[in-house]
């Protein structure tokens, strides 16, 4: 009698455990989900892989949207011949006149350097490309790539070294800054051999497919947007609060609003040593330097 009572009570518990075990597919599930070509999104233990072959690229997206925060991914890029491929890690809002912050990793032939292109779209307008090479080989190990976004700045970081800052000059110079639309976080891999490598001259060599970028971590700390609630009050909550259900909003504390001295030095170093192209210094394209470029 006592035994069967115990068994009766244990069964639902056991079922719950089995169900939750089968549902926990990977540690990535809390934050992101496959969003393009699910059969090319591969979970392997603690790793996630995005695959590109001649049938498709692939991608994932965050489950939530955020207004301010920091999104990071630890990525090992396609090794060997990656020419023609692009792996992107980015944040984007939805709808017209969208905002977007991009990392695009432009592949190359075996042994030739990857380039990292960054760009920002603000109210639907992009054309803010910068390109850098890296101070390491991004295909042999995992490195972290992050975007920090708060009311004062958007910062692109590589292994916590800032490589680009877009600061809020709205009140001083009337330059648009993204501050009232939530953004989701995305990553994808696709064929871009019409432009990615040496301006499109080097094509993807499909005999080297599949091309795989590998993720060890995707981490998002931010103010999670609640859909269906009054827009203005959500903007207010995420902009003005210091604390919420996600914890302390550390990404918009005072010391996150601008680079510290050490970070400013890192930024100068990275840009002087590794910048390949900067739209701010391209008079053929912009005879008048874009306003946000003057500091
Ligand atoms: C795609 O790749 C597969 C495997 O390498 C190959 O068998 C197939 O013919 C390719 N398809 C096209 C359209 O090139
Ligand atoms: C690829 O390698 C070539 C030769 O080193 C270099 O000029 C180019 O900038 C590299 N990156 C891309 C994306 O083309």
Image: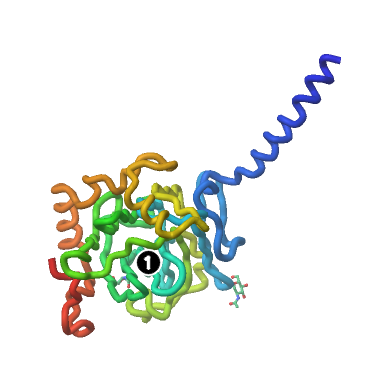
Q: Is residue 65 above or below residue 98?
A: above
**Towards the viewer: 21 or 215:** 21
Q: Is residue 251 above or below residue 14?
A: below
Left or right of 149: which side holds 31? right
Residue at image location 38% in from the left, 52% down from the top = 71
Label 1, residues with CA under 10 Å away: few <14, some 14-19, many ≥20 = many
The residue singled out by tag 1 in the image is: 100
The secondary structure type at the circle numbered 1 is: strand
In the rendered image, residue 99, in percent from the top left (x then y), is placed at 37, 67
Q: Is residue 279 visible?
A: yes
Q: Is residue 12 above or below residue 26?
A: above
**Towards the viewer: 60 or 135:** 60
Left or right of 163: which side holds 191? right
Left or right of 117: which side holds 270? left
Q: Residue furthest right?
A: 1
In the rendered image, residue 242, in percent from the top left (x then y), is placed at 32, 43
Figure colour scheme: rainbow
Picture quadrant of residue 149: bottom left
Residue at image location 30% in from the left, 54% down from the top = 150
Residue at image location 24% in from the left, 63% down from the top = 166
Residue at image location 45% in from the left, 48% down from the top = 216
Left or right of 99: which side holds 132? left
Q: Is residue 141 visible?
A: no
Q: How many marks?
A: 1
Look at the image and tell me in which quarter the C terminus lies: bottom left
In the rendered image, residue 45, in percent from the top left (x then y), is placed at 55, 45
Q: In which quadrant of this rendering is ligand 2 seen?
A: bottom left
Picture quadrant of residue 36: bottom right
């Amino acid at each position: 009698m006592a035994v069967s009572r115990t068994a009766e009570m244990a069964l639902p518990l056991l079922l719950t455990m089995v169900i939750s075990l089968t549902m926990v597919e990977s540690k990535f599930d809390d934050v992101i989900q496959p969003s393009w070509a699910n059969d090319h999104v591969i979970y392997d233990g603690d790793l996630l892989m995005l695959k590109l072959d001649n049938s498709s690229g692939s991608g994932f997206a965050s489950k939530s949207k955020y207004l301010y925060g920091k999104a990071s991914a630890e990525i090992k890029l396609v090794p060997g011949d990656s020419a023609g491929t692009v792996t992107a890690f980015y944040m984007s809002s939805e709808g017209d006149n969208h905002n977007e912050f991009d990392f695009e990793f432009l592949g190359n032939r075996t042994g030739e350097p990857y380039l990292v292109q960054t760009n920002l779209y603000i109210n639907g307008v992009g054309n803010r490309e910068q390109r850098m090479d890296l101070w390491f080989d991004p295909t042999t190990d995992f490195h972290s790539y992050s975007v920090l976004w708060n009311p004062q700045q958007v910062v692109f970081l590589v292994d916590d070294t800032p490589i680009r800052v877009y600061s809020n000059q709205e009140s001083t110079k009337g330059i648009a800054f993204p501050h009232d639309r939530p953004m989701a976080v995305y990553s994808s891999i696709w064929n871009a051999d019409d432009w990615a490598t040496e301006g499109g001259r080097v094509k993807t060599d499909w005999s080297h497919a599949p091309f795989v970028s590998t993720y060890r971590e995707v981490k998002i700390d931010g103010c999670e947007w609640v859909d269906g609630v009054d827009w203005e009050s959500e903007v207010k909550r995420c902009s003005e609060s210091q604390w919420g259900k996600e914890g302390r909003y550390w990404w918009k504390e005072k010391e996150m609003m601008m680079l510290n001295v050490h970070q400013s030095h890192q930024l100068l170093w990275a840009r002087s040593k590794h910048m390949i192209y900067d739209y701010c210094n391209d008079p053929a394209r912009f005879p008048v330097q874009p306003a946000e470029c003057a500091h």
